Structure formats: structure tokens, C-alpha cells
Image (cartoon, grey):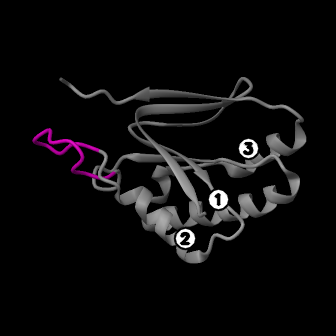
Amino acid sequence: ETMRALIQKIDRACVWAGSDVVCSIGEGIFVLLESIKDDSKDDYQFISKKILSLKLFENEARKHWTKSVSENNFQVLLIPQYSLEEEKFKEESDSFDIVAQLTRSHYRSQDVHCNPKFLAHHLIDHSVYFFRFQFFKKTFPR
């Protein structure tokens, strides 16, 4: 087993914690990232580069699956999929921080959005806390 990422192509996305907007982005991708204890620096590098290089978007000729988020200068919203088990939480949040930093270093840092410390604070300090994600998905013309 290794790190996993669920990636959704979007027109825009918002993340709320209660009534507070934590983050919002324009066109790009939403990434829900899960890590495990045995992930290595090579795993972090691989997933970071993969997130930015996946061919999810169409080109100027409207051919699908030909351009990446970085080729289009779109935005990335990274969200950690943390375990709520306290022992695992620290390891997972550390590895998420590393992937977030690497992704920012491989791309324009202002277009990689994440706020793991805010999310971690709410997950640890509140026994139950709900995050609401709103996606505006890309649709393909038929």
C-alpha cells in the first residue's frame, strides 16, 4: 500500500469549516490526499509530480485528456484525508505537509492551495467537525 490521491477536475471549488470559508480556487483540480506510515520521500515526489502532470484537460482543438493542470496554469486545491486515530494523525499530517511543499515547489506556489494546519486544528480540537466541499465540475460538450 502507498499514498493515494482522489482527483476531481473542477471549474471552481470552495471549502467551508462551519460558516468559515477555508479556501476557494478557480478552474483546476481538487485533490483528496491520503498517506500511510510507510510512504517515502520518493513516494512524496512521485505523487506531487503526478498531480501536476496528469492529462485531464482538453487542448485548444478541444481534444480531451491532452493537457495537465500545470500546462493550463490552473489551480490545485490539496486536502488531506486524515485518519481520526490520534496515533496515525501526526504521521499523516507530516507527510501531507511534505507533499504540499513539494507540489508548491514543482509549480507556482500561489496556485497550490491547502490549509492543513487549519484542518488539523479543527479535527483535533472538535470531537465532531464537518467540512463542506462545494465543487463546480467541468462538463464535456457532447
The reply to whether dot 1 and dot 2 touch (C-beta < 8 Å) is yes
In terms of sequence position, does the residue under pointer 3 or pointer 1 come before the other? 1
Task: Examine the rendered structure and indicate whether residue 127 appears above or below residue 69.
Answer: above
- Kindly identify the residue that appears in the image at 73 percent across and 58 percent down: 93
- Crowding near pointer 2: few (<14 within 10 Å), some, many (20+)? some
State the extent of the magenta-drawn residues as a range. Answer: 57-68
Give the amino acid at mark 1: Ser
Task: Examine the rendered structure and indicate whether residue 29 appears above or below residue 70.
Answer: above
- Residue occupied by mark 2: 43
Total labels drawn:
3
Whole-percent x and y of residue 36? 68, 62
In terms of sequence position, does the residue under pointer 1 or pointer 2 come before the other? 1
- Kindly identify the residue that appears in the image at 43 percent across and 56 percent down: 51
Q: Is residue 76 magenta?
A: no
Question: Which structural element holds mark 3?
Answer: helix
Q: Quadrant of the C terminus?
A: top left
Residue 22 is marked as none
Give the amino acid at mark 3: Leu
Give the amino acid at mark 2: Asp
